[in-house]
Amino acid sequence: VSERSTTAPPFEQPGERRKAEMKKLYGKDAAKILAMETAMQLTFDRNCDLKQPKYWPVIPLKL
Amino acid sequence: SIPTSAVSDADAEQLQKEQHARSVLRERFLRCVLSMTNKNVRFHMHERVKVEATFGASDIDVLNFQVSDLHTPIGVQKEALIRSQDVISFTFDI
Amino acid sequence: MQCRWPLLGPLRWITYVNKHVKVKAGKDEVLWGWLLTVDPVSASLVLMDFKEDGGASVQVVMGHAVEEVQIQQEADEETTDRLQASFLPPKTCGLDP
């Protein structure tokens, strides 16, 4: 949809790189694991947006 | 000597075994983490710190735990993030 | 000598599954339980301890804190089944049309 010059390297589709990595790690189960992970990360991100949790303890116990 | 094709077949088989093992292990772990949602979790942290909280979610790299009603030694923090690096182990009941 | 736990990799970790293990973690924590799985991303272990009332307690030991893992015992068939069934999605009742 967005215009880009034909001389620029093609954009990497977001997620394509990750998909390829997942394929290497999980083989034929990559899609299943990716789907589970995507759902889990979405929940985490949504909860953080909603609840704005602060780190506890403020300073890491173990650096 | 071993023909190169035999070597690469063996490599491919080994890779598939490893991928299968990784996905079995990962799926079980993810299901375990999902089952913790809204459960009371006790964290054992470094420096002998022990806290309890209601589990919310974890990021997929298991770097942070998002929790609610965290009972710290100095009071309750309504919403908190716990760094997994600070944690030795945590426990919950099913 | 045991290689550093987080570096063992899936094919080694999976040999610990369904075993009763003793885990040394952090400076002085020792934990026991049936090993359900090892997260291949964080090398964290999931240990289960079944109670008489049918419940179970679950301990997750962070991979970075693991000092040593020792196998103590193999699971019998019943324990293996309980482990396998622990976090499966709830089965729908057999009443589907």
Image: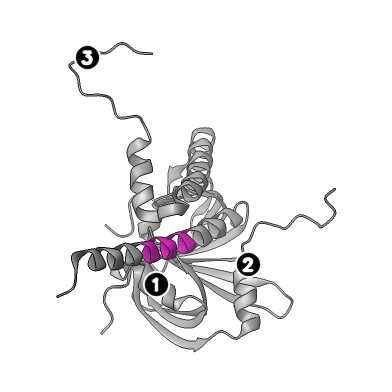
Is A24 situated left or right of C87 in this image? left
Badge 1 amino acid: Trp
Q: Which residue is mark 1?
A: C13
Tag 2's secondary structure?
loop
Q: How is the image coloured?
A: one colour
Seen in the picture, residue C91 relative to B77 is either above or below; the reply is below
Asked where in the image residue A15 lies, by quadrant, the reply is: top left
As for residue A49 lying within the magenta part, the answer is no
Whether tag 2 and tag 1 are in contact, CB under 8 A, the answer is no
Mark linked to residue A6:
3
Mark linked to residue C86:
2
Q: Position of residue B61 (x, y in %)?
A: 39, 51
Q: Are marks 2 and 1 on the same chain?
A: yes
Is disc 1 surrounded by few (<14), some (14 to 19) or many (20+) residues within 10 Å?
Answer: many
Q: Residue at x 44, y 83 (%)?
A: C22
- Determine the CA span between mark 3 and mark 2: 54 Å
Badge 3 amino acid: Thr
Q: Residue at x 72, y 58 (%)?
A: C91
Choose the circle earlier in sequence order: 2 or 1.
1
| Image quadrant containing the N terminus of chain C | bottom left
Q: Main secondary structure of the magenta part?
A: helix
Is disc 2 surrounded by few (<14), some (14 to 19) or many (20+) residues within 10 Å?
Answer: some
Chain containing mark 2: C
Q: Residue at x 49, y 33 (%)?
A: A49
Tag 1's secondary structure?
helix
Is disc 3 surrounded by few (<14), some (14 to 19) or many (20+) residues within 10 Å?
Answer: few
- The residues colored magenta run B16-26
